[in-house]
Image (tube, helix red, strand yellow):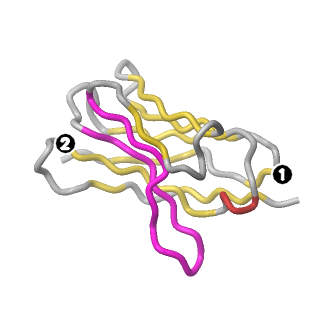
Amino acid sequence: QVQLVESGGALVQPGGSLRLSCAASRTISNIYNMGWYRQAPGKQRELVATIRITGSTDYADSVKGRFTISRSNAKNTMYLQMNSLKPEDTAVYYCKAHLYSTSPPLWGQGTQVTVSS
């Protein structure tokens, strides 16, 4: 089993930047798919960005051009660089991984991002 631990959440002003990290308990080089999701109060959890074992990425329309997902196999860590943050980006951000194409998702515990002046 793989454990995922998110970090990097904080209170930031609109227009600011944050980098979230998702550290895995073992190598991520052969993990099929990893991604970031977020859940705002009173809303459903939604996809933010995903990155496949091939390195290809997908983004929600609301974050395209502002957020960048990446992974470091050497550090067993996935990142989410968030720039030009908006109040509507406020949410708990979760790391998700599918070890294989047919395996159930694994989730981290989440990290809070608050964008406010």
Q: Position of residue 67 (x, y in %)?
A: 60, 39
Above-or-below relation of 40 to 113: below
Residue 64 in which image quadrant: top right
Q: Earlier in the sequence, mark 2 or mark 1?
A: 1
Task: Tell me where the magenta segment starts and ends, as one range.
Answer: 33-53
Q: Which residue is mark 1?
A: 13
Q: Secondary structure at mark 1?
A: loop
Q: Position of residue 48 (x, y in %)?
A: 49, 51
- For this orientation, the residue located farthest to the right is 117
Magenta-drawn stretch contains 114: no
- For this orientation, the residue located farthest to the bottom is 42
**Main secondary structure along the magenta-highlighted residues:** strand
Q: Amino acid at mark 1?
A: Gln
Residue 89 in which image quadrant: bottom right
Q: Which residue is mark 2?
A: 99
Left or right of 1? Residue 8 is right
Q: Amino acid at mark 2?
A: Leu
Instruction: Say few, some or many: other residues with alpha carbon within 10 Å of mark 1 (under 14 / 14 to 19 / 20 or more).
Output: some
Above-or-below relation of 51 to 117: above
Q: State the residue at coordinates (35%, 29%).
A: 56
Q: Position of residue 94 (x, y in %)?
A: 46, 55
Q: State the residue at coordinates (18%, 47%).
A: 1
